[in-house]
Amino acid sequence: MPKDWYEWHDLYDTEPKLQQRLEIVQEWVRRDWITDAIATPPVQTTQTIPTVSKL
């Protein structure tokens, strides 16, 4: 197992099992993102400005 970040990521370009794993994870992330985008209603925000009272 490589300890260098770049070397570790380079393995995804050369190792078929890691390439397959990456594709699976990317698909899960896409599906989850799409599901969240569809299922989550839009959020309405309001801004309040605190008042400072002088005593």
Image (cartoon, rainbow, N blue to C red):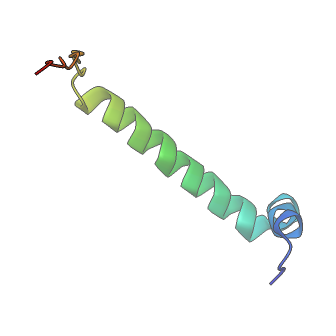
15 horizontally vs 37: left or right = right
State the residue at coordinates (20%, 20%).
50
Residue furthest toward the bottom? 1
34 horizontally vs 18: left or right = left
State the residue at coordinates (23%, 15%).
49
16 horizontally vs 49: left or right = right
37 to 24, vertically: above or below:
above
Q: Nearer the viewer, residue 17 or 45?
A: 45
Residue 42 % position (x, y): 25, 20
Q: How many marks?
A: 0
Task: State the image quarter where residue 32 is shown.
Answer: top left
Residue 9 % position (x, y): 81, 62
Q: Where, quadrant-wise, is the C terminus in this rendering?
A: top left
48 to 12, vertically: above or below:
above
Residue furthest toward the left? 55
Residue 47 % position (x, y): 24, 16
Q: Nearer the viewer, residue 18 or 45?
A: 45
Q: Where, quadrant-wise, is the N terminus in this rendering?
A: bottom right
State the residue at coordinates (58%, 49%).
26
